């Protein structure tokens, strides 16, 4: 059974929500990144979204764009991301979702991508700029593997389209909380609650919320609405704001625990 | 195989927005609904005679069309080969072909009830054109422009501001057109309900490549009729510069089923053997960027390279997906022209014809001059003179001084 499915099954039994962390692979460098990812998983991240750095991340805000640039500057690439995931897999059993822009996969060769993902033990693939209409080739390469294609849905996604998105998707649905890029705040909780309920009624997969979630208070408000929360820029901001690399894993782990408390109802938001 | 007989006009894109394996819609989910809305709106507008009549009247009364077809006689005599004709898009309002597209998209924005427009710009010509149409229609306008281009194209920045647009400096990445387009896309994702994104070239996600081509084909439609009327024959060779490739698609499209050779001229910068060029087709490989599958300048690992050209309007690491297809079909040949060759052609047109061309158009001209030498006087080369060069004067003076060339 796919690790993502197993995780959601277990969380459901425990009546808990999934904390999904997005962290860019190789930010700020390969070795520190490994320590950060390991610390995040050990601190209680349920699913890890491992971002492949891209030169032109048009769906991301300035925080993740800068993280991508730091990783690229340190020599990171898709091949090295696979190496990092393989090393991580030796020490943690956390499900890993590869989060990429399509050009990196296309240029690497979809066939190679599929086989390397299976080899290193990656459980899901989310391609942020690949709608299902363009994903035929990728689906073909992944068919027969256990790897899930994770789909995004936006506030602008129509109900008819949502049905289509969910067909052939697996793992969970990544529901974008609002229009815009990653990492900017200003969440309208009641609008999100209404939208999430509509989507949950139509979607057989676990529904997880992402974009703009950064504090324990956000987590406390949003966790009851969905099956999980995705936090990215808040982690990447810690990497950007810390001079001493050796402190980064510990600071990331603290952030994980803070968000976890929010989600588990131990922090009451304002 | 009977490839020659295959009609190209009207054949692409297919119903899903693809030009063969190129084009498509490689964007985040948030934009899908807006692109679908745009596609529907464009389909309905282009089949609405009232809309098209308004478009044509504005092209005539506001943009000053048709632009002339002009025989460059003294230049042709000096070269002593094929005769060179110029399609004078530099004579259009705002000084370049870009106005054709923005009139169309501006009218469409109005039809869709959008009150705000945004655009990316490299050389500033598309930004100026968008600011112009926003002023004419009373719309709020934001133009995204890389800081490096703001430096190179100062007069156009001033123009946009005079026209009431807000110029938003983009400092990410290489601070040029590619980053301006990324910034505009990001802004659009956030403000998608109220904002119309006027893309300036035949790239981006479907329906932009098709829509911009259809709005720019007036260049080729006019030129084809003018050739037949003024010269009583079709040109043997069509030449246009290609950054994103809108003036080239506009000129080429109505001639695609005619027995005319076509060359798209890419910016070879400091040379195709160096990393400093912007020749996505001659020096790149297929990939997906800014919403479309096309040829890109990129590393083996799929990271996008910086493009380089003396001309800000050609300084882009991708190209419109229809050009990618026409290249693969061998219908259009893509050639490189270096910074130096373009500057020489720029100077030559100034001196021989009294026309100051844009540095972008000077690339097309340089290739035409080279090619004319190899051909006889009964052959005709039609060059798209896509814009005028006033905006380039400071930059070109700097270039001549730095390279110790005569002005």
Image (cartoon, rainbow, N blue to C red):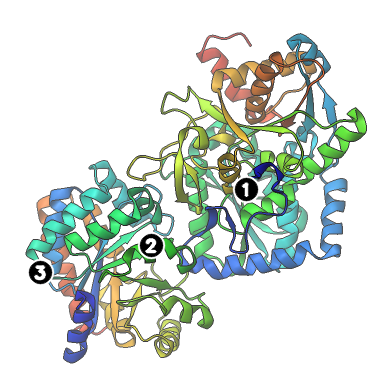
Judging from the image, what secondary structure is the residue with disc 1 in?
loop
Chain name for mark 1 = B
Residue picked out by circle 3: A42
Q: Tell me which corner region of the image, top left, top right, bottom left or bottom right, holds residue B249.
A: top right
Q: Are marks 3 and 1 on the same chain?
A: no
Q: Report the mark closest to the observer, 1 or 2.
A: 2
Disc 2 to disc 3: CB gap under 8 Å? no
Q: Report the mark closest to the observer, 2 or 3.
A: 2
Q: Are marks 2 and 3 on the same chain?
A: yes
Q: Is residue B333 above or below residue B138?
A: above
A258 and B206: which is toward the camera: B206
Q: Earlier in the sequence, mark 2 or mark 3?
A: 3
The residue located at (17%, 54%) in the rendering is: A84
Residue picked out by circle 1: B202
Chain name for mark 2 = A
The residue located at (34%, 87%) in the rendering is: A225
| B223 horizontally vs A45: left or right | right
Residue B183, image x and y in percent? Answer: 49, 52
Q: CA distance from mark 3 to mark 1?
A: 49 Å
The residue located at (29%, 65%) in the rendering is: A232
Q: Name the mark on residue A138.
A: 2
B126 and B77: which is toward the camera: B77
Judging from the image, what secondary structure is the residue with disc 3 in?
helix
Residue A142, image x and y in percent? Answer: 32, 65
Residue B27, image x and y in percent? Answer: 48, 61
> Mark 2: few, some, or many residues within 10 Å (few <14, many ≥20)?
many
Q: CA distance from mark 1 to mark 2?
A: 26 Å
> Mark 3: few, some, or many residues within 10 Å (few <14, many ≥20)?
some
């Amino acid at each position: 059974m796919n690790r993502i499915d197993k995780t959601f099954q277990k969380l459901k039994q425990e009546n808990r929500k999934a904390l999904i962390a997005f962290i860019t692979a190789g930010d700020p460098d390969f070795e520190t990144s490994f320590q950060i990812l390991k610390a995040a998983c050990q601190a209680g991240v349920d699913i890890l979204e491992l971002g492949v750095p891209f030169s032109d991340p048009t769906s991301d805000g300035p925080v993740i764009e800068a993280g991508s640039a730091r990783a690229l500057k340190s020599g990171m690439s898709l091949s090295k991301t696979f190496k990092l995931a393989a090393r991580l897999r030796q020490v943690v059993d956390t499900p890993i979702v590869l989060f990429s822009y399509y050009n990196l996969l296309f240029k690497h060769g979809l066939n190679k991508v599929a086989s390397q993902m299976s080899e290193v033990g990656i459980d899901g693939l989310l391609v942020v700029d690949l709608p299902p209409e363009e994903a035929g080739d990728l689906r073909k390469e992944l068919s027969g593997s256990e790897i899930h294609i994770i789909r995004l849905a936006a506030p602008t996604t129509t109900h008819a389209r949502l049905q289509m998105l969910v067909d052939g998707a697996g793992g969970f649905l990544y529901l974008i909380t609002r229009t815009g890029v990653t990492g900017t705040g200003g969440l309208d909780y009641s609008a999100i609650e209404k939208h999430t309920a509509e989507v949950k009624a139509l979607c057989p997969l676990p529904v997880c919320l992402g974009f703009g979630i950064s504090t324990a208070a956000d987590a406390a408000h949003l966790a009851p609405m969905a099956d999980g929360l995705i936090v990215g820029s808040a982690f990447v901001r810690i990497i950007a704001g810390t001079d001493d690399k050796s402190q980064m894993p510990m600071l990331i782990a603290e952030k994980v625990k803070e968000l976890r408390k929010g989600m588990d109802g131990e922090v009451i938001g304002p | 195989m009977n490839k020659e007989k295959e009609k190209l006009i009207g054949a692409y894109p297919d119903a899903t927005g693809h030009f063969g394996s190129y084009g498509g819609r490689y964007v985040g989910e948030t934009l899908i609904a807006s692109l679908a809305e745009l596609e529907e709106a464009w389909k309905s507008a282009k089949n609405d005679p009232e809309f098209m009549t308004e478009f044509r009247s504005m092209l005539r009364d506001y943009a000053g069309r048709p632009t002339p077809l002009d025989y460059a006689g003294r230049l042709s005599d000096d070269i002593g080969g094929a005769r060179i004709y110029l399609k004078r898009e530099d004579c259009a309002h705002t000084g370049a072909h870009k106005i054709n597209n923005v009139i169309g998209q501006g009218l469409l924005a109005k039809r869709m009830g959008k009150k705000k427009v945004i655009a990316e710009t490299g050389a500033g010509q598309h930004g100026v054109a968008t600011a112009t149409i926003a002023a004419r229609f009373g719309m709020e306008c934001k133009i995204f422009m890389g800081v490096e281009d703001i430096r190179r194209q100062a007069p156009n920045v001033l123009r946009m501001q005079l026209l009431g647009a807000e110029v938003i400096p983009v400092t990410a990445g290489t601070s040029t057109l590619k980053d301006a387009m990324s910034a505009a896309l990001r802004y659009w994702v956030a403000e998608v309900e109220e904002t119309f994104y006027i893309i300036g070239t035949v790239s981006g996600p479907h329906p932009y490549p098709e829509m911009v081509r259809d709005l720019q084909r007036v260049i080729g439609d006019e030129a084809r009729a003018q050739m037949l009327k003024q010269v009583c024959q079709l040109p043997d060779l069509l030449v246009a510069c290609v950054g994103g490739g809108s003036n080239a698609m506009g000129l080429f499209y109505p001639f695609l089923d005619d027995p005319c050779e076509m060359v798209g001229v890419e910016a070879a910068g400091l040379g195709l053997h160096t990393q400093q060029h912007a020749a996505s087709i001659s020096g790149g490989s297929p990939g997906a960027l800014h919403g479309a599958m096309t040829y890109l300048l990129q590393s083996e690992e799929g990271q996008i390279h910086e493009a380089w050209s003396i001309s800000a309007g050609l300084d882009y690491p991708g190209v419109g997906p229809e050009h990618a297809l026409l290249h693969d079909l061998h219908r259009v040949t893509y050639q490189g022209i270096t910074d130096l060759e373009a500057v020489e052609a720029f100077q030559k047109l100034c001196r021989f014809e009294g026309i100051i061309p844009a540095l972008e158009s000077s690339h097309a001209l340089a290739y035409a001059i080279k090619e004319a030498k190899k051909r006889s006087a009964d052959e005709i080369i039609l060059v798209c003179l896509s814009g005028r060069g006033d905006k380039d004067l400071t930059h070109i003076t700097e270039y001549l001084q730095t390279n110790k060339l005569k002005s």
